[in-house]
């Protein structure tokens, strides 16, 4: 089973089912997550800063590649509405710029 741990998001790691995007898994686990374009890969508000486990992610989608090429998405970030985790464990964090005001984020040390 694939697991997503978001260091600064309270709660247990999130199970990611095959074929599910990270955003779908987060929503299924009851988490509210910014996604201004409605999860269509047209913005970068749903991004996740990846700390470790990027090798387990499916390759970046065309939308992610466009944002990477334009410098609007760091190479260490992925769009949760696009990224899939077929297997393994992924650790990341919600960037400060896309944190929702009504969610109580955990202060993390910046490392695993």
Image: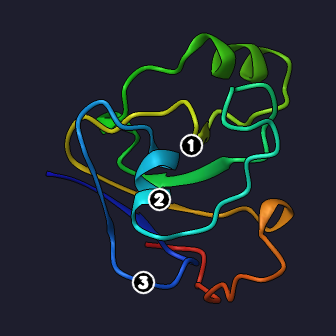
- Mark 1 or mark 3: name the one nearer the start of the chain: 3
Circle 1 packing at 10 Å, graded few (<14), some (14-19), many (20+), is many
| Alpha-carbon span between mark 2 and mark 1 | 9 Å
Q: Secondary structure at mark 1?
A: loop
Choose top left, top right, bottom left or bottom right for residue 87: top left
User: Horizontally, is 15 left or right of 76 in the view?
Assistant: left
Disc sitting over residue 93 in the figure:
none
> Which one is in front, 11 or 110?
11
Q: Secondary structure at mark 3?
A: loop
Choose top left, top right, bottom left or bottom right for residue 20: top left
Q: Residue at x 72, y 37 (%)?
A: 74
Where does label 2 land, which residue?
A: 26
> Which one is in front, 46 or 66?
46
Residue 70 position, x and y percent, is 85, 18
Residue 17 position, x and y percent, is 24, 44
Are the two marked residues, 2 and 1, in contact with CB atoms closer than 8 angstroms?
Answer: yes
| Alpha-carbon span between mark 3 and mark 2 | 11 Å
Circle 3 packing at 10 Å, graded few (<14), some (14-19), many (20+), is few
Q: Residue at x 52, y 21 (%)?
A: 60
Q: Residue at x 41, y 59 (%)?
A: 28
User: Where is the C terminus found, in terms of image quarters?
Assistant: bottom left
| Vertical side of 4 occupied by 10: above or below | below
Where does label 3 land, which residue?
A: 11
Q: Secondary structure at mark 2?
A: helix
| Vertical side of 102 occupied by 39: above or below | above
Where does label 1 land, which residue?
A: 80
| Vertical side of 6 occupied by 12: above or below | below
């Amino acid at each position: 089973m694939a697991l997503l741990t978001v260091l600064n998001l309270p709660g247990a790691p999130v199970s990611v089912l095959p074929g599910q995007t990270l955003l779908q898994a987060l929503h299924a686990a009851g988490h509210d997550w910014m996604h201004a374009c409605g999860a269509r890969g047209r913005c970068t508000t749903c991004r996740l800063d990846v700390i470790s486990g990027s090798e387990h992610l499916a390759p970046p989608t065309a939308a992610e590649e466009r944002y990477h090429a334009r410098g609007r998405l760091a190479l260490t970030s992925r769009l949760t509405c696009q990224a899939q985790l077929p297997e393994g464990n992924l650790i990341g964090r919600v960037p400060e710029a896309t944190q929702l005001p009504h969610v109580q984020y955990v202060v993390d040390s910046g490392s695993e």
